[in-house]
Amino acid sequence: MTSTGGPSAHTPSRIALVAFPGVRAFDVSVITEVWGVDRTDRGVPPFVLRRTAPTPAPIPLRGGLSLTPDRTLSWLARADLIVVPGLDDHVTPAPEPVLEALRRAHARHTPIAALCGGAFTLAQAGLLDGRRAVTHWNLTDLLRTGHPAVKVVPDALFVHDDNLWTSAGTAAGIDLCLHLVRTTHGAEAAATIARSMVTAPFRTGTQAQFIEHPTPHTDRDADSLAAVRTFALTRLAEPHTIADLAGMSARSFARHFQASTGTTPLRWLITQRVAAAQKLLERTDLPLPEVARRTGFGSEITMRQHFATHLGTSPRDYRLAFHRSPARTGVDTPHPHP
């Protein structure tokens, strides 16, 4: 899932949702919303989502809901991606057929993603031994204690290690699902899905920003920082420094920005520029130096360096993988969601 290859526009990606008693209804809904809705009329590639389980029997979910599988676990052999929902009870073992099916899938090099407490299922299967993983911040110690061979990362939104993806709590599962769409089908497909879900295409920072203060305070500083981010997004092509953006001392600005976004002003700005460059590479035939200029990188070399760091590919290869014939070229610089 880290490459920009993936199925062609005419070959639907096959996604397997692994279900068993105890999986969270919210995570099942997230997976279904991302891959189970037909958005081909808006340019999103087709997906085939199958709800797999050890048996065809309906699976009870919390809140009086139930899930009826449409395939057994044998369908995992056909999947391009397997997604494991989080759990209501993180210490109850998953059924052995589920664990064995996940082991076989990993041996086949099929990417596997676990949302929130789904990391415990991968850990029970032994897949996370010696590998980095993340879960909800409130479950970090439980995962570390119950599975000491796992290298638990305490503050990431999601983590990738050896074709295994894990994510932090609840909303971070949405972040991971959209990231997986973005890495295989491009930023525009992920942004279209995000817009229909009324969520941001991606978030910067780590889950550390949510531990003490789940939501930022809507005070004077937060309002001013939102205005600063909007100002920077509408002028990505221009050089920016903290001194230019800060309406306070540089040290105070950096501290408040980190508290609000979970990242530094420079890292946030670079992330926005990469996202804007992705859209231009997908939508236009602009030369690479012009894409770099419009998105504030200044040079193609600098843009290439940041693409390698953030996306593991080059701007040229990204365009080859995700470019769509635009109705026109030379469009205005697109701006990601603030």
Image (cartoon, rainbow, N blue to C red):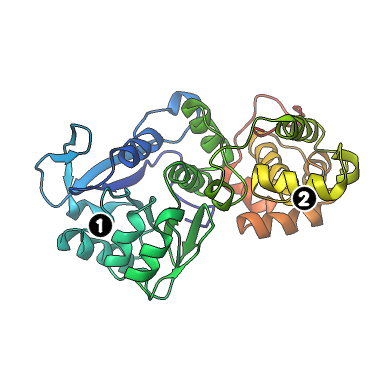
Q: Is residue 131 left or right of residue 317?
A: left
Question: Which residue corresponds to the image point at 18% horizontal and 53% vertical from the top-left?
Answer: 73
Q: Which mark is residue 77?
A: 1
Q: Residues within 10 Å of mark 2 (few under 14, many from 20)?
A: few
1 or 2: tag closer to the N-terminus: 1
Residue kind at label 2, given as amino acid type: Leu
Q: Report x, y in % for residue 8.
A: 45, 44
Q: Is residue 311 visible?
A: yes
**In which quadrant will I find the C terminus?**
top right
The reply to whether the C-beta atoms of the residues labelled 1 and 2 are less than 8 Å apart is no
Question: Which residue corresponds to the image point at 62% horizontal and 46% vertical from the top-left?
Answer: 204
Residue named by callout 2: 266
User: Which residue is nearer to you in this view: 293 or 250?
Assistant: 250
Q: Is residue 137 left or right of residue 55?
A: right
Question: Which residue corresponds to the image point at 57% horizontal and 41% vertical from the top-left?
Answer: 202
Q: Residues within 10 Å of mark 1 (few under 14, many from 20)?
A: some
Vertical order, 202 against 83 (above or below): above
Vertical order, 46 against 79 (above or below): above
Q: Secondary structure at mark 2?
A: helix
Q: Secondary structure at mark 1?
A: helix
Q: Report x, y in % for residue 132.
A: 47, 68
Residue kind at label 1, given as amino acid type: Ala
Q: Report x, y in % for residue 91.
A: 25, 60
Q: Report x, y in % for residue 307.
A: 68, 54
User: Farthest residue toward the right?
Assistant: 243
Task: Name the front one of labels 1 and 2.
Answer: 2
Q: Is residue 241 visible?
A: no
* Number of marks drawn: 2
